[in-house]
Image: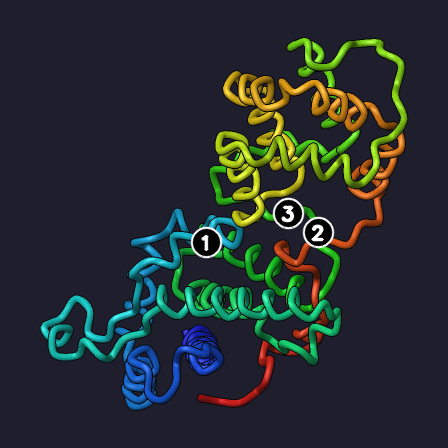
Protein backbone atom coordinates (compact mmCIF):
# COMPACT_ATOMS: atom_id res chain seq x y z
CA UNK A 1 0.00 0.00 0.00
CA UNK A 2 2.85 2.38 0.87
CA UNK A 3 4.52 1.80 -2.50
CA UNK A 4 1.21 2.49 -4.25
CA UNK A 5 0.75 5.73 -2.32
CA UNK A 6 4.30 6.82 -3.17
CA UNK A 7 3.73 6.11 -6.86
CA UNK A 8 0.53 8.12 -6.89
CA UNK A 9 2.16 11.03 -5.08
CA UNK A 10 5.09 11.04 -7.51
CA UNK A 11 2.89 10.78 -10.63
CA UNK A 12 0.41 13.45 -9.60
CA UNK A 13 3.21 15.93 -8.84
CA UNK A 14 4.74 15.29 -12.27
CA UNK A 15 1.32 15.64 -13.88
CA UNK A 16 0.64 18.96 -12.16
CA UNK A 17 4.08 20.19 -13.21
CA UNK A 18 3.44 19.35 -16.86
CA UNK A 19 0.02 21.02 -16.71
CA UNK A 20 1.61 24.21 -15.45
CA UNK A 21 4.26 24.04 -18.16
CA UNK A 22 1.61 23.69 -20.87
CA UNK A 23 -0.45 26.61 -19.59
CA UNK A 24 2.59 28.88 -19.51
CA UNK A 25 3.59 27.81 -23.03
CA UNK A 26 0.27 29.01 -24.49
CA UNK A 27 0.62 32.52 -25.96
CA UNK A 28 -2.91 33.43 -24.87
CA UNK A 29 -2.13 32.83 -21.19
CA UNK A 30 -0.34 35.98 -20.18
CA UNK A 31 -0.29 36.71 -16.47
CA UNK A 32 -2.46 34.78 -14.03
CA UNK A 33 -4.76 32.75 -16.24
CA UNK A 34 -7.83 31.20 -14.54
CA UNK A 35 -6.61 27.69 -15.45
CA UNK A 36 -3.27 28.42 -13.78
CA UNK A 37 -4.92 29.95 -10.70
CA UNK A 38 -7.11 26.87 -10.24
CA UNK A 39 -4.15 24.54 -10.82
CA UNK A 40 -1.99 26.31 -8.24
CA UNK A 41 -4.80 26.27 -5.70
CA UNK A 42 -5.24 22.53 -6.20
CA UNK A 43 -1.50 21.98 -5.91
CA UNK A 44 -1.32 23.98 -2.66
CA UNK A 45 -4.14 21.99 -1.08
CA UNK A 46 -2.63 18.73 -2.34
CA UNK A 47 0.78 19.46 -0.78
CA UNK A 48 -0.92 20.10 2.56
CA UNK A 49 -3.08 16.97 2.44
CA UNK A 50 -1.28 14.59 0.07
CA UNK A 51 -1.88 11.58 2.34
CA UNK A 52 -5.65 12.10 2.17
CA UNK A 53 -7.08 9.15 0.15
CA UNK A 54 -9.69 11.51 -1.26
CA UNK A 55 -7.17 12.72 -3.85
CA UNK A 56 -7.05 9.25 -5.35
CA UNK A 57 -10.83 9.18 -5.22
CA UNK A 58 -11.05 12.32 -7.41
CA UNK A 59 -8.94 10.73 -10.17
CA UNK A 60 -10.68 7.39 -9.77
CA UNK A 61 -14.02 9.14 -10.22
CA UNK A 62 -12.77 10.81 -13.39
CA UNK A 63 -11.57 7.47 -14.76
CA UNK A 64 -14.78 5.58 -13.94
CA UNK A 65 -16.88 8.37 -15.46
CA UNK A 66 -14.90 8.26 -18.72
CA UNK A 67 -13.55 4.70 -18.66
CA UNK A 68 -14.33 3.68 -22.25
CA UNK A 69 -13.00 6.95 -23.66
CA UNK A 70 -9.81 6.83 -21.56
CA UNK A 71 -9.07 3.28 -22.72
CA UNK A 72 -9.39 4.51 -26.33
CA UNK A 73 -6.44 6.89 -25.97
CA UNK A 74 -4.21 8.06 -27.54
CA UNK A 75 -5.87 7.75 -30.98
CA UNK A 76 -9.36 8.92 -29.95
CA UNK A 77 -8.75 12.09 -27.96
CA UNK A 78 -11.36 14.65 -29.08
CA UNK A 79 -13.57 13.85 -26.10
CA UNK A 80 -10.81 14.98 -23.73
CA UNK A 81 -11.10 18.55 -25.03
CA UNK A 82 -14.50 18.86 -23.38
CA UNK A 83 -15.41 20.24 -19.96
CA UNK A 84 -13.52 17.70 -17.85
CA UNK A 85 -11.84 18.52 -14.55
CA UNK A 86 -10.60 17.08 -11.28
CA UNK A 87 -12.48 18.82 -8.49
CA UNK A 88 -11.20 19.01 -4.92
CA UNK A 89 -13.96 18.10 -2.48
CA UNK A 90 -16.06 16.29 -5.10
CA UNK A 91 -18.76 14.21 -3.48
CA UNK A 92 -18.70 16.30 -0.28
CA UNK A 93 -20.26 19.56 0.87
CA UNK A 94 -16.88 21.25 0.34
CA UNK A 95 -17.15 21.11 -3.45
CA UNK A 96 -19.32 24.23 -3.78
CA UNK A 97 -16.95 26.39 -1.71
CA UNK A 98 -13.82 25.01 -3.43
CA UNK A 99 -14.74 25.51 -7.08
CA UNK A 100 -11.37 27.11 -7.83
CA UNK A 101 -9.49 24.12 -6.37
CA UNK A 102 -9.58 22.08 -9.54
CA UNK A 103 -7.50 20.78 -12.45
CA UNK A 104 -9.17 21.89 -15.67
CA UNK A 105 -8.16 18.78 -17.62
CA UNK A 106 -10.17 19.42 -20.78
CA UNK A 107 -9.13 23.05 -21.03
CA UNK A 108 -5.45 22.30 -20.45
CA UNK A 109 -5.46 19.51 -23.04
CA UNK A 110 -7.00 21.87 -25.59
CA UNK A 111 -4.20 24.30 -24.80
CA UNK A 112 -1.62 21.57 -25.39
CA UNK A 113 -3.12 20.83 -28.81
CA UNK A 114 -3.25 24.54 -29.69
CA UNK A 115 0.41 25.01 -28.73
CA UNK A 116 1.27 22.02 -30.96
CA UNK A 117 -0.73 23.47 -33.86
CA UNK A 118 1.01 26.84 -33.50
CA UNK A 119 4.35 25.03 -33.58
CA UNK A 120 3.33 23.22 -36.77
CA UNK A 121 2.37 26.55 -38.34
CA UNK A 122 5.76 27.94 -37.37
CA UNK A 123 7.53 24.98 -38.97
CA UNK A 124 5.41 25.35 -42.10
CA UNK A 125 6.21 29.05 -42.39
CA UNK A 126 9.96 28.65 -41.92
CA UNK A 127 10.42 25.38 -43.80
CA UNK A 128 13.03 24.31 -41.26
CA UNK A 129 13.57 20.75 -40.11
CA UNK A 130 15.37 21.76 -36.90
CA UNK A 131 12.37 21.13 -34.69
CA UNK A 132 14.24 20.94 -31.40
CA UNK A 133 15.70 24.45 -31.56
CA UNK A 134 12.67 26.08 -33.16
CA UNK A 135 9.74 24.83 -31.11
CA UNK A 136 11.22 22.68 -28.32
CA UNK A 137 8.57 20.56 -26.63
CA UNK A 138 5.66 22.44 -28.20
CA UNK A 139 5.09 19.78 -30.87
CA UNK A 140 4.71 17.08 -28.22
CA UNK A 141 2.69 18.70 -25.44
CA UNK A 142 -0.44 16.60 -26.16
CA UNK A 143 1.58 13.39 -25.77
CA UNK A 144 3.33 14.73 -22.68
CA UNK A 145 -0.03 15.57 -21.11
CA UNK A 146 -1.56 12.19 -21.99
CA UNK A 147 1.49 10.31 -20.73
CA UNK A 148 1.34 11.81 -17.24
CA UNK A 149 -2.45 11.72 -16.98
CA UNK A 150 -2.48 8.04 -17.95
CA UNK A 151 0.24 7.20 -15.41
CA UNK A 152 -1.79 8.85 -12.65
CA UNK A 153 -4.92 6.94 -13.69
CA UNK A 154 -2.95 3.68 -13.74
CA UNK A 155 -2.35 4.21 -10.00
CA UNK A 156 -6.06 4.37 -9.17
CA UNK A 157 -7.84 2.08 -11.67
CA UNK A 158 -8.82 -1.56 -11.21
CA UNK A 159 -6.25 -4.23 -12.06
CA UNK A 160 -8.31 -5.31 -15.07
CA UNK A 161 -7.80 -1.89 -16.71
CA UNK A 162 -4.20 -1.27 -15.65
CA UNK A 163 -2.68 -3.43 -18.38
CA UNK A 164 -4.44 -1.40 -21.07
CA UNK A 165 -3.34 1.88 -19.50
CA UNK A 166 0.25 0.65 -19.39
CA UNK A 167 -0.02 -0.15 -23.12
CA UNK A 168 -1.02 3.46 -23.71
CA UNK A 169 1.88 4.66 -21.55
CA UNK A 170 4.29 2.52 -23.60
CA UNK A 171 2.97 3.91 -26.89
CA UNK A 172 3.30 7.51 -25.70
CA UNK A 173 6.80 6.88 -24.37
CA UNK A 174 7.93 5.55 -27.75
CA UNK A 175 6.56 8.65 -29.45
CA UNK A 176 8.33 10.99 -27.03
CA UNK A 177 11.60 9.10 -27.32
CA UNK A 178 11.49 9.21 -31.10
CA UNK A 179 11.62 5.42 -31.26
CA UNK A 180 10.18 3.43 -34.18
CA UNK A 181 6.54 2.68 -33.52
CA UNK A 182 5.63 -0.89 -32.66
CA UNK A 183 2.31 -2.42 -33.64
CA UNK A 184 -0.27 0.30 -33.22
CA UNK A 185 -2.08 0.16 -29.88
CA UNK A 186 -5.66 -0.99 -30.35
CA UNK A 187 -8.32 1.68 -29.97
CA UNK A 188 -9.70 0.44 -26.68
CA UNK A 189 -10.63 -2.95 -25.24
CA UNK A 190 -13.48 -3.54 -27.69
CA UNK A 191 -11.38 -2.96 -30.81
CA UNK A 192 -11.59 -5.74 -33.37
CA UNK A 193 -8.38 -7.69 -33.92
CA UNK A 194 -9.54 -8.61 -37.40
CA UNK A 195 -9.71 -5.02 -38.68
CA UNK A 196 -8.30 -4.68 -42.17
CA UNK A 197 -5.35 -2.32 -42.64
CA UNK A 198 -6.00 0.84 -44.62
CA UNK A 199 -4.96 0.51 -48.27
CA UNK A 200 -1.80 2.28 -49.35
CA UNK A 201 -2.31 5.52 -51.22
CA UNK A 202 -1.51 5.04 -54.91
CA UNK A 203 -1.78 8.06 -57.20
CA UNK A 204 -1.44 5.84 -60.28
CA UNK A 205 -4.60 3.95 -59.29
CA UNK A 206 -6.37 7.22 -58.59
CA UNK A 207 -5.56 8.54 -62.07
CA UNK A 208 -6.52 5.22 -63.67
CA UNK A 209 -9.86 5.27 -61.87
CA UNK A 210 -10.42 8.85 -62.95
CA UNK A 211 -9.74 7.88 -66.57
CA UNK A 212 -12.15 4.92 -66.29
CA UNK A 213 -14.92 7.09 -64.86
CA UNK A 214 -14.44 9.81 -67.48
CA UNK A 215 -14.36 7.20 -70.25
CA UNK A 216 -17.68 5.83 -69.04
CA UNK A 217 -19.13 9.32 -69.22
CA UNK A 218 -17.86 9.78 -72.78
CA UNK A 219 -15.46 12.53 -71.77
CA UNK A 220 -12.28 10.51 -72.46
CA UNK A 221 -12.25 7.91 -75.23
CA UNK A 222 -10.95 4.55 -74.04
CA UNK A 223 -8.03 3.26 -76.09
CA UNK A 224 -7.34 6.62 -77.70
CA UNK A 225 -3.75 7.27 -78.79
CA UNK A 226 -2.01 9.33 -76.12
CA UNK A 227 -1.45 12.95 -77.17
CA UNK A 228 1.67 14.89 -76.23
CA UNK A 229 1.97 16.12 -72.66
CA UNK A 230 0.23 19.44 -71.99
CA UNK A 231 2.34 22.43 -71.06
CA UNK A 232 2.18 24.33 -67.77
CA UNK A 233 -0.12 27.13 -69.10
CA UNK A 234 -2.51 24.52 -70.50
CA UNK A 235 -2.65 22.66 -67.18
CA UNK A 236 -3.26 25.96 -65.41
CA UNK A 237 -6.21 26.69 -67.70
CA UNK A 238 -7.54 23.18 -67.15
CA UNK A 239 -7.52 23.47 -63.38
CA UNK A 240 -8.92 26.98 -63.54
CA UNK A 241 -11.90 25.82 -65.61
CA UNK A 242 -12.60 22.80 -63.42
CA UNK A 243 -11.93 23.92 -59.86
CA UNK A 244 -13.78 27.23 -60.06
CA UNK A 245 -17.02 25.26 -60.00
CA UNK A 246 -18.65 25.50 -56.49
CA UNK A 247 -19.71 21.82 -56.42
CA UNK A 248 -16.19 20.64 -57.21
CA UNK A 249 -14.74 23.05 -54.65
CA UNK A 250 -17.07 21.55 -52.03
CA UNK A 251 -15.98 18.02 -52.93
CA UNK A 252 -12.32 18.87 -52.65
CA UNK A 253 -13.07 20.68 -49.40
CA UNK A 254 -14.39 17.38 -48.04
CA UNK A 255 -11.19 15.64 -49.17
CA UNK A 256 -8.98 18.34 -47.65
CA UNK A 257 -10.88 18.03 -44.37
CA UNK A 258 -9.57 14.48 -44.03
CA UNK A 259 -6.04 15.88 -43.67
CA UNK A 260 -7.06 18.17 -40.80
CA UNK A 261 -8.63 15.17 -39.06
CA UNK A 262 -5.32 13.29 -39.12
CA UNK A 263 -6.49 10.53 -41.47
CA UNK A 264 -3.88 8.37 -43.18
CA UNK A 265 -3.38 8.46 -46.95
CA UNK A 266 -5.33 5.25 -47.49
CA UNK A 267 -8.43 6.70 -45.82
CA UNK A 268 -7.99 9.99 -47.70
CA UNK A 269 -7.72 8.15 -51.04
CA UNK A 270 -10.89 6.22 -50.26
CA UNK A 271 -12.82 9.43 -49.56
CA UNK A 272 -11.35 11.02 -52.71
CA UNK A 273 -12.54 8.12 -54.86
CA UNK A 274 -16.05 8.34 -53.42
CA UNK A 275 -16.18 12.07 -54.12
CA UNK A 276 -14.79 11.75 -57.66
CA UNK A 277 -17.21 8.98 -58.63
CA UNK A 278 -20.33 10.66 -57.25
CA UNK A 279 -23.06 11.49 -59.84
CA UNK A 280 -23.06 15.14 -58.77
CA UNK A 281 -19.35 15.52 -59.51
CA UNK A 282 -19.55 13.75 -62.86
CA UNK A 283 -22.46 15.92 -63.94
CA UNK A 284 -20.51 18.94 -62.80
CA UNK A 285 -17.39 17.82 -64.69
CA UNK A 286 -19.35 17.24 -67.88
CA UNK A 287 -20.96 20.65 -67.65
CA UNK A 288 -17.69 22.39 -66.79
CA UNK A 289 -15.60 20.80 -69.55
CA UNK A 290 -18.15 21.03 -72.32
CA UNK A 291 -15.76 23.39 -74.10
CA UNK A 292 -13.83 21.34 -76.75
CA UNK A 293 -10.49 22.91 -75.84
CA UNK A 294 -10.90 21.99 -72.17
CA UNK A 295 -11.90 18.43 -73.13
CA UNK A 296 -8.72 18.10 -75.18
CA UNK A 297 -6.61 19.34 -72.29
CA UNK A 298 -8.28 16.87 -69.91
CA UNK A 299 -7.52 14.02 -72.28
CA UNK A 300 -3.87 15.02 -72.35
CA UNK A 301 -3.67 15.55 -68.60
CA UNK A 302 -5.21 12.22 -67.58
CA UNK A 303 -3.34 10.23 -70.24
CA UNK A 304 0.18 11.52 -69.67
CA UNK A 305 2.52 8.66 -68.58
CA UNK A 306 5.12 11.17 -67.37
CA UNK A 307 2.62 12.68 -64.94
CA UNK A 308 1.53 9.26 -63.69
CA UNK A 309 5.16 8.24 -63.19
CA UNK A 310 5.91 11.46 -61.32
CA UNK A 311 2.92 11.18 -58.99
CA UNK A 312 3.53 7.46 -58.41
CA UNK A 313 7.15 8.12 -57.47
CA UNK A 314 6.18 10.77 -54.93
CA UNK A 315 3.07 9.27 -53.40
CA UNK A 316 3.08 5.56 -54.23
CA UNK A 317 4.54 2.76 -52.21
CA UNK A 318 8.22 3.24 -51.57
CA UNK A 319 8.11 6.96 -52.48
CA UNK A 320 10.47 9.50 -51.00
CA UNK A 321 8.16 12.47 -50.74
CA UNK A 322 8.61 14.84 -47.80
CA UNK A 323 5.75 14.17 -45.35
CA UNK A 324 3.31 16.99 -44.77
CA UNK A 325 3.73 18.71 -41.42
CA UNK A 326 -0.01 18.44 -40.88
CA UNK A 327 0.70 14.87 -39.78
CA UNK A 328 3.59 15.74 -37.51
CA UNK A 329 6.87 13.97 -38.31
CA UNK A 330 8.73 12.05 -35.60
CA UNK A 331 10.67 14.44 -33.44
CA UNK A 332 13.91 14.28 -31.52
CA UNK A 333 14.04 12.04 -28.43
CA UNK A 334 12.50 14.37 -25.88
CA UNK A 335 12.32 11.52 -23.39
CA UNK A 336 15.70 9.82 -22.80
CA UNK A 337 15.42 6.00 -22.66
CA UNK A 338 16.47 5.74 -19.01
CA UNK A 339 14.63 8.78 -17.67
CA UNK A 340 11.66 8.61 -15.35
CA UNK A 341 9.58 10.79 -17.65
CA UNK A 342 10.87 13.92 -15.95
CA UNK A 343 11.35 15.81 -19.17
CA UNK A 344 12.64 18.99 -17.61
CA UNK A 345 12.88 17.92 -14.00
CA UNK A 346 11.58 21.10 -12.42
CA UNK A 347 8.80 21.00 -9.85
CA UNK A 348 5.74 23.17 -9.88
In the image, residue 259 sits, relative to residue 19, either above or below, namely: above
Mark 1 Cα within 10 Å, few/some/many (few <14, many 20+)? some
Percent across and percent down for residue 79 are 38, 52
In the image, residue 192 sits, relative to residue 164, either above or below, namely: above
In the image, residue 51 sits, relative to residue 123, either above or below, namely: below
Percent across and percent down for residue 329 are 69, 60
Give whichever of discs 1 and 3 has the lower sequence position: 1
Q: CA distance from mark 1 to mark 3?
A: 15 Å
Compared across the picture, whether 16 is left or right of 321 comes to left
Q: Residue 296 appears in which quarter of the rendering?
A: top right
The residue at the point 59 percent across, 22 percent down is 285
Q: Are marks 3 and 2 in contact (CB under 8 Å)?
A: yes
Percent across and percent down for residue 265 are 66, 40
* Quadrant assignment for the N terminus: bottom left
Compared across the picture, whether 20 is left or right of 258 comes to left
The residue at the point 80 percent across, 41 percent down is 232
* Quadrant assignment for the C terminus: bottom left
Observer able to see residue 2: no
Q: Which residue is mark 2?
A: 182
Q: Which residue is mark 3?
A: 184
Q: CA distance from mark 3 to mark 2?
A: 6 Å
Mark 3 Cα within 10 Å, few/some/many (few <14, many 20+)? few
**Element type at mark 1:** loop
Q: Which residue is mark 1?
A: 77
> Residue extending furthest left?
93
Amino acid sequence: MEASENNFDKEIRLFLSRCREIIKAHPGCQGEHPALICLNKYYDIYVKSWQDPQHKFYFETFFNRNRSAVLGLPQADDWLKGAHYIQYGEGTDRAASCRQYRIMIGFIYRMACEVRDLALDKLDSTGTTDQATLVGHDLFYPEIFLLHLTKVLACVCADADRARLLQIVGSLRRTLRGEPAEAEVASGPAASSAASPAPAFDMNSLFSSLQTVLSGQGVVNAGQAQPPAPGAPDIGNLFGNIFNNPAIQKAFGNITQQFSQGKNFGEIASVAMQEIQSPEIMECVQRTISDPQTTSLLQQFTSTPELNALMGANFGQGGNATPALTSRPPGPPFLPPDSDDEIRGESI
